[in-house]
Image: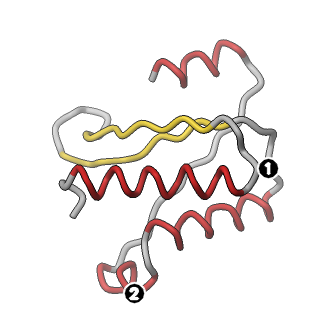
């Protein structure tokens, strides 16, 4: 499933649509297909978007929405895994440029 380019494209579109519906106007997405060392196939979607720092409650709700949209609960329970979502915020132009280049 995660090796099919059409499935990956669909997941990317779903994530972008969800964030746009929530008011984010600038949403940039990019798939990375391998982990840190490039040895094992481990697709993960990087998303950069405009906005500010999210309080813990808002962040938890957003993460839950993304999980429900991209991985149905029945599949998550069936495979015994859920989506890992990491969130970072920065005002530093240097850090933002690093994320954009990544």
Quick one: 66 or 13, which is closer to the camera?
13
Quick one: 7 or 46, which is closer to the camera?
7
Residue 28, x across and y down, in percent: 54, 35
Badge 1 local density, few (<14 within 10 Å), some, or many (20+)? few
Residue 62, x across and y down, in percent: 68, 62
| Image side of residue 79 versus residue 64, left or right | left
The Cα atoms of the two marked residues, 2 and 1, are separated by 28 Å
Location of the C terminus (image quadrant):
top left
| Image side of residue 57 versus residue 40, left or right | right
Image coloring type: secondary structure
| Image side of residue 81 versus residue 73, left or right | left
Residue linked to disc 2: 74
Quarter of the rendering containing residue 94:
top right
Location of the N terminus (image quadrant):
bottom left
Sequence-first disc among 2 and 1: 1
Element assignment for label 1:
loop
Tag of residue 42: none
Identify the residue at horizontal 79%, vertical 50% (top origin).
54
Identify the residue at horizontal 59%, vertical 16% (top origin).
97
Identify whether 74 is placed above or below 44.
below
Mark 2 vs mark 1, foreground winner is: 2
Element assignment for label 2:
helix
Quick one: 82 or 37, which is closer to the camera?
82
Identify whether 3 is placed above or below 82.
above
Residue linked to disc 1: 54
Identify the residue at horizontal 66%, vertical 35% (top origin).
26
Residue 98, x across and y down, in percent: 54, 18
The answer to whether mark 2 and mark 1 are in CB contact below 8 A is no
């Amino acid at each position: 499933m995660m090796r099919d380019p059409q499935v990956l494209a669909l997941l990317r579109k779903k994530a972008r649509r969800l964030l746009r519906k929530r008011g984010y106007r600038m949403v940039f997405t990019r798939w990375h297909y391998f982990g840190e060392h490039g040895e094992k196939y481990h697709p993960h979607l990087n998303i950069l978007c405009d906005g500010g720092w999210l309080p813990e409650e808002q962040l938890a709700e957003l993460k839950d929405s993304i999980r429900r949209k991209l991985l149905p609960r029945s599949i998550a329970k069936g495979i015994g895994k859920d989506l890992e979502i990491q969130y970072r915020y920065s005002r530093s132009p240097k850090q933002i440029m690093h994320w954009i280049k990544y």
